[in-house]
Image: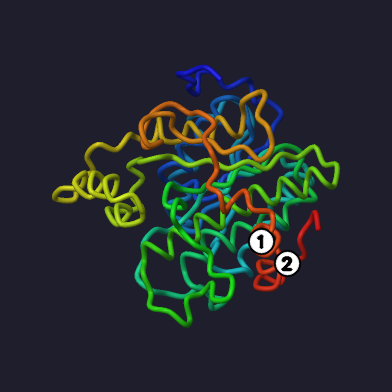
């Protein structure tokens, strides 16, 4: 990998189809825009019809190939996830080259999804896991799942994932959801390899990027020095120190398009603390490399979502 890999290094994507969740803003919109500019047919999976329509216009302007399309998707509602997966499979003729599990909520007040799950765990993780499983029969290339530096030091409470029996902490809940995303990405790849599939599952994180998710992100980091820097990087509602989405989206774009990517890899900024910089392969957290945790989370996810995993 070149030390300064950018979207200019992305190979021609003509003939490929990609679905990007949360494509109405931030990292998702940037990812959709770049993939479309490289010739890919992009499906923008968005919760808000109004914001999705505006994003669609932006991506259409950038598109160098097939027309992008909008798919309604609310990851906090499993019925919506099932409907979006069915729509995507119909639109693509059961041939999807790239799935980018990008959407998310961060450090929210305590809340529940339509299906009764803790809001961040249900939206960031369970919704994406269910969507991935439902789309597996159509996938031909890569699954890219977004994690976060908040996964460092986080814990997955397998016996109480929705926090029913402990005091709610927004940052801890966010960390759990993003660690679960990373664990899932690596477990999915292990199972794909065992099944002899050519599909790759990889993970990525944007470092410290101004995405509009709010200053609450500072509380999501376990390292007190990093936490202090990030907390100081927000002043009067203005985000300081953070890189923009053009740079922040590069790890997931690399994971989705670069040659030589290996399944089970994790990509993030190469700079100090993986907070900023151009993309590089970075170490996954120890929990994500745990096969026992991966298997346990896989089984719990199937039980909670009622979706049959593929590959099993």
Question: Relative to 304, is 190 on the left or the right?
Answer: right
- Could you tell me which residue is drawn at 50 percent across and 36 percent down? 31
Colour scheme of the picture? rainbow
Instruction: Give the residue at x 54% y 72%.
Output: 161
Residue 134: quadrant of the picture = bottom right
The crowd level at tag 2 (other Cα within 10 Å; few <14, some 14-19, many 20+) is: some
Quarter placement of the C terminus: bottom right
Q: Is residue 69 visible?
A: no
24 vs 208, nearest the viewer? 208
Quarter of the image with the N terminus is top right
Residue hosting label 2: 307
Q: Position of residue 301 (x, y in %)?
A: 66, 66
Q: Which residue is mark 1?
A: 130
Q: Disc 2 on helix, strand or loop?
A: loop
- CA–CA distance in space, label 2 to label 1: 6 Å
At x 53%, y 35%, the residue is 267
Height in image: 19 above or below 123? above
Examine the image and state in which quarter residue 266 appears. Answer: top right
Q: Splitting the image into 4 quarters, where does residue 260 fall?
A: top right
Residue occupying the point 48% across, 50% down? 52
Tag 1: Cα neighbours inside 10 Å, few (<14), some, or many (≥20)?
Answer: many
Q: Position of residue 202 (x, y in %)?
A: 63, 41
Observer able to see residue 55: yes
x, y percent for residue 17: 68, 37
- Asked if marks 2 and 1 touch (Cβ < 8 Å), the reply is yes
Picture mark count:
2
Asked whether, in this view, residue 271 is left or right of residue 283, the answer is left
Name the foreground residue: 43 vs 298.
298
């Amino acid at each position: 990998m070149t030390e300064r890999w950018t979207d200019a290094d992305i190979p021609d994507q003509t003939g490929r189809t990609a679905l990007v969740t949360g494509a109405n803003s931030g990292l998702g919109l940037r990812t959709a825009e770049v993939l479309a500019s490289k010739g890919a047919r992009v499906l923008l999976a968005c919760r808000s019809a109004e914001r999705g329509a505006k994003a669609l216009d932006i991506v259409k302007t950038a598109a160098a190939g097939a027309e992008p399309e909008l798919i309604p998707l609310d990851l906090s509602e499993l019925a919506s996830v099932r409907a979006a997966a069915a729509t995507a499979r119909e639109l693509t003729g059961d041939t999807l080259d790239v799935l980018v599990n990008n959407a998310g909520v961060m450090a929210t007040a305590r809340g529940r999804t339509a299906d009764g799950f803790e809001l961040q765990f249900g939206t960031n993780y369970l919704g994406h896991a269910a969507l991935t499983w439902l789309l597996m029969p159509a996938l031909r290339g890569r699954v890219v799942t977004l994690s976060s530096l908040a996964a460092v030091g986080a814990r997955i409470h397998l016996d109480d994932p929705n926090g029913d029996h402990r005091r709610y902490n927004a940052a801890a809940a966010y960390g759990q959801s993003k660690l679960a995303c990373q664990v899932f990405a690596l477990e999915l790849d292990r199972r794909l390899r065992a099944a002899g599939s050519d599909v790759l599952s990889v993970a990525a994180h944007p470092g410290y990027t101004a995405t509009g998710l709010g200053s609450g992100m500072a509380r999501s980091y376990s390292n007190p020095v990093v936490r202090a820097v990030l907390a100081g990087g927000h002043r009067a509602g203005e985000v300081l120190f953070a890189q923009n989405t053009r740079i922040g989206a590069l790890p997931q774009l690399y994971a989705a398009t670069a040659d030589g990517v290996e399944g089970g890899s994790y990509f993030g900024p190469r700079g100090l603390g993986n907070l900023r910089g151009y993309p590089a392969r970075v170490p996954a957290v120890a929990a994500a490399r745990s096969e026992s945790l991966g298997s346990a989370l896989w089984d719990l996810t199937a039980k909670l979502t009622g979706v049959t995993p593929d590959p099993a």
